[in-house]
Image (cartoon, rainbow, N blue to C red):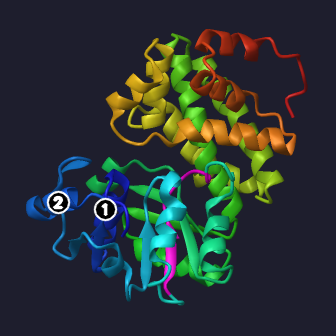
Amino acid sequence: MLGAGSWGTALAIQLARNGHKVSLWGHRPAHITEIESLRENRQYLPGFLLPESLRTDTDIHSTVEGAEKILLAVPSAVFRNLLQQIKAVIEDDSTLIWATKGVEQVSHKLLHQVVEEELGETHPKALLSGPTFALEVAKGLPTAVTVASNDHQQAHAVAELFHSEIFRCYTSNDLAGVEVGGTTKNILAIAAGIADGLGFGANTRAALMTRGLHEQMKLGIRLNGRQETFMGLSGLGDLVLTCTDNQSRNRRLGLAIGRGHPLQKALDDIGQVVEGVEAARDVSEMADQLGIEMPITEQVAQVLHRGKSPSEAVNTLLQRNRKPES
């Protein structure tokens, strides 16, 4: 298990609850040493003792060497770098699983494309995504996710690892669609937070979510995803979760921006990576390159990266020409 933030720790706990032996690695040795000493990730997921079968490791190579399954729950910005660090010691038949949501910066590649470039197109791989908050997974509250792989048997094998009475896993072979859903929902959660921070109501939030879902579908289908994927857990489900609940870092950041706080202060107050910030710029650039209109995404990028005020962004959206809904 690579990634000792809140999400990586929660998934490690879930796997250990299911009876699997888990080794948890993080990039800061002092943090990992503290977790092992306290048997708790007090910084990112306080209040949950680690199961006995969950151990920690400060050496990335010893963590992955000989492992049958390797799970990454790290920011998308370091995803390729971690693959490059470990690919020399990964077994050819070791399944790589990731629970990272985002695209690669600059190249704008989906993460399964990064995996194929670094490990080869045929390396066993799968993605876990869906409407999940780490705290609720750690608490053992009922949760449902999607496990996607281009290999049907691989998807089922990975789903079996996580599946339990309180953690339900569905499978999909639409890697691109699931990845686009997981990336774009963070941007739309920032938009919903900005709208609520400005004092707009439920009507506005519902409109943003619905038109945001339309943007997700346009981009996903263009990248060879399937429309029905966006009506599932990794599309609509994750969108509803992150746009409506303040456990979402992306929504909280949007709320702060809408209330007039500078971006950096909002990020500092949250204290963890907010994937939607970089994703807004990356996806906006992707849409431009592909000739796809994604007006909500574009306005979030303008606010976060180009100094546009939230109220100006709202006016831009409201003044768009009338058009058919579909």
Apparent side of residue 45 relative to residue 67 in the rendered image (left or right): left
**Camera-side residue of 117 and 279:** 117
User: What's drawn in magenta, residue-wise?
Assistant: 94-104
Label 2 environment density (alpha carbons within 10 Å; few <14, some 14–19, many ≥20): many
Apparent side of residue 69 relative to residue 305 in the rendered image (left or right): left
Find residue 191 and report its image quarter.
top right
Q: Amino acid at mark 1?
A: Gly
Which residue is tagged 1?
26
Residue 323 visible in rendering? yes
Above or below for 187 versus 88: above
Q: Marks 1/2: CA distance? A: 10 Å
- Residue at 60 percent across and 17 percent down: it is 307
Find residue 313 and report its image quarter.
top right
Mark 1 or 2: in front is: 1
Which residue is tagged 2?
35
- Residue at 65 percent across and 73 percent down: it is 116
Apparent side of residue 41 relative to residue 208 in the rendered image (left or right): left
Q: Amino acid at mark 2?
A: Ile
Label 1 environment density (alpha carbons within 10 Å; few <14, some 14–19, many ≥20): many
Above or below for 23 versus 319: below
**Camera-side residue of 171 and 34:** 34
- The C terminus lies in quadrant: top right
- The N terminus lies in quadrant: bottom left
